[in-house]
């Protein structure tokens, strides 16, 4: 699954510039290094990566930075020849600061694009793995999903996919049961702190919001442990479901991840019956993301 989600983000970010397996390896290794370090980061109470970890991590990004520098150079050339690419990097390369009359360079573009990989590869991959489990253990969900997607064709686009609502409800239910980023952090400001529902929070305090706990709160969710996609047909409290966070710093990848996961499920389930055949459920462990502790083992049968 991570290969699929990596390919999607790589295509969106770099378009045709990711040409072969060795380019993909550079991106994959950078993401893996991030998660290796991120596991250690969760034992610190800091919302930004501590310096001692940054010092270990940054040298490992050299190949990724070199790759981006190279792509930026090629894209500048392409733009000057009127053959601009249709990728996110190209949009960044074209951005000009009118005050200083300068364009964004590798230093600005590289960390932003890297955030997209760090934020978008594992999260969507985990969500799809848990989706296989939920759908593969609930035949009634699988049949309803199949009925909805069986007549879709390859020309699905952004508008037509919005009408395919059950797939979206299934994904929302999966993200409720296993929010890929289960805890979100915020810091209060430097001077006044904050007051929420009578609770005073001092200035410069890190506050962790446990999204997973909210997703299981019986005040908002009846029978919270059970997978019931239909619950998303009803309105609920606006903050009862928040796998992508809230407010100005919420997930920038929410739309693309829902879109890519929906497309993956539509293509899979209109062609195949996929049942879970593992001995036990996939479990979970918390780190910077929530992930299964056991593989999601499935059987795949072609539909005729
Ligand atoms: C199921 C998939 C995903 C989940 C559950 C998820 C969840 C989250 C959450 C909870 C946050 C923090 C929000 C907050 O603090 O309020 C976040 C931030 C972020 N996500 Fe995602 N995400 C997903 C997919 C993606 C994808 C596909 C991308 C990139 C294309 C992405 C890029 C980012 C970035 C760059 C941030 C940092 C935003 C900022 O700090 O301003 N995410 N994500």
Image (tube, rainbow, N blue to C red):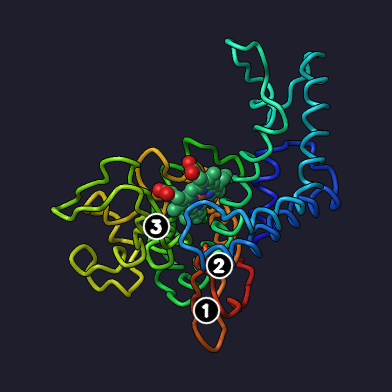
Q: Is residue 124 shown left or right of residue 7?
A: left
Residue pointed to by mark 3: 172
First reached walking from the N terminus: tag 2 or tag 1: 2
State the separation of the CA atoms marked 1 and 3: 18 Å
Q: Is residue 117 shown left or right of residue 151?
A: right
Q: In the structure shown, which secondary structural element does the residue marked by tag 2 occupy?
A: helix
Q: Position of residue 278 (x, y in %)?
A: 57, 84
Q: Quadrant of the C terminus?
A: bottom right
Q: Pointers 3 and 2 in contact (CB under 8 A)?
A: no
First reached walking from the N terminus: tag 1 or tag 3: 3
Residue pointed to by mark 2: 129
State the separation of the CA atoms marked 3 and 2: 14 Å
Residue at the spot 64% in from the left edge and 40% down from the top edge: 111
Residue pointed to by mark 1: 282
Q: Pointers 2 and 1 in contact (CB under 8 A)?
A: yes
- Crowd around label 2: few <14 · some 14–19 · many ≥20 (10 Å): some
Residue at the spot 41% in from the left edge and 43% down from the top edge: 163
Residue at the spot 54% in from the left edge and 78% down from the top edge: 276
Residue 7 can be seen, yes or no: yes
Q: Residue furthest front?
A: 191
Q: Which mark is residue 31?
A: none
Residue 258 can be seen, yes or no: no
Q: In the structure shown, which secondary structural element does the residue marked by tag 3 occupy?
A: helix
- Crowd around label 1: few <14 · some 14–19 · many ≥20 (10 Å): some
Q: In the structure shown, which secondary structural element does the residue marked by tag 1 occupy?
A: loop
State the separation of the CA atoms marked 2 and 1: 9 Å
Q: Position of residue 293 (x, y in %)?
A: 56, 78
Nearer to us in this view, 37 or 236: 37
Q: Is residue 237 shown left or right of residue 258?
A: left
Residue at the spot 32% in from the left edge and 75% down from the top edge: 225
Q: Position of residue 221 (x, y in %)?
A: 24, 65
First reached walking from the N terminus: tag 3 or tag 2: 2
């Amino acid at each position: 699954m991570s290969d699929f989600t990596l390919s999607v983000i790589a295509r969106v970010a770099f378009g045709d510039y990711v040409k072969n397996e060795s380019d993909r390896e550079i991106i994959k290794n950078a993401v893996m290094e991030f998660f290796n370090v991120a596991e250690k980061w969760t034992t610190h109470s800091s919302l930004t990566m501590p310096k001692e970890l940054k010092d270990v991590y940054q040298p490992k990004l050299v190949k990724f930075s070199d790759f981006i520098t190279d792509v930026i150079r090629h894209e500048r050339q392409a733009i000057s020849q009127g053959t601009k690419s249709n990728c996110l990097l190209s949009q960044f390369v074209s951005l000009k600061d009118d005050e200083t009359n300068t364009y964004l360079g590798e230093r600005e573009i590289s960390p932003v694009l890297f955030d997209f990989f760090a934020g978008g590869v594992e999260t969507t991959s985990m969500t799809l793995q848990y989706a296989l489990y939920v759908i593969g253990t609930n035949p009634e969900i699988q049949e309803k999903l199949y009925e909805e997607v069986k007549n879709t064709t390859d020309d699905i686009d952004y508008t037509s996919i919005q009408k395919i609502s059950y797939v979206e409800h299934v994904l929302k239910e999966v993200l409720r049961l296993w929010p890929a980023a289960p805890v979100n952090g915020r810091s209060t400001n430097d001077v006044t702190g904050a007051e929420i529902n009578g609770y005073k929070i001092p200035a410069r305090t890190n506050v962790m919001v446990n999204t997973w706990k909210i997703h299981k709160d019986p005040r908002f969710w009846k029978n919270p442990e059970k997978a019931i996609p239909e619950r998303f047909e009803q309105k609920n409290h606006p903050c009862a479901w928040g796998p992508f966070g809230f407010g100005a710093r919420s997930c920038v990848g929410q739309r693309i991840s829902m879109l890519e996961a929906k497309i993956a499920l539509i293509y899979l389930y209109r062609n195949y019956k996929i049942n879970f055949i593992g001995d036990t459920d996939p479990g979970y462990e918390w780190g910077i993301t929530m992930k299964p502790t056991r593989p999601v083992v499935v059987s795949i049968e072609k539909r005729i």
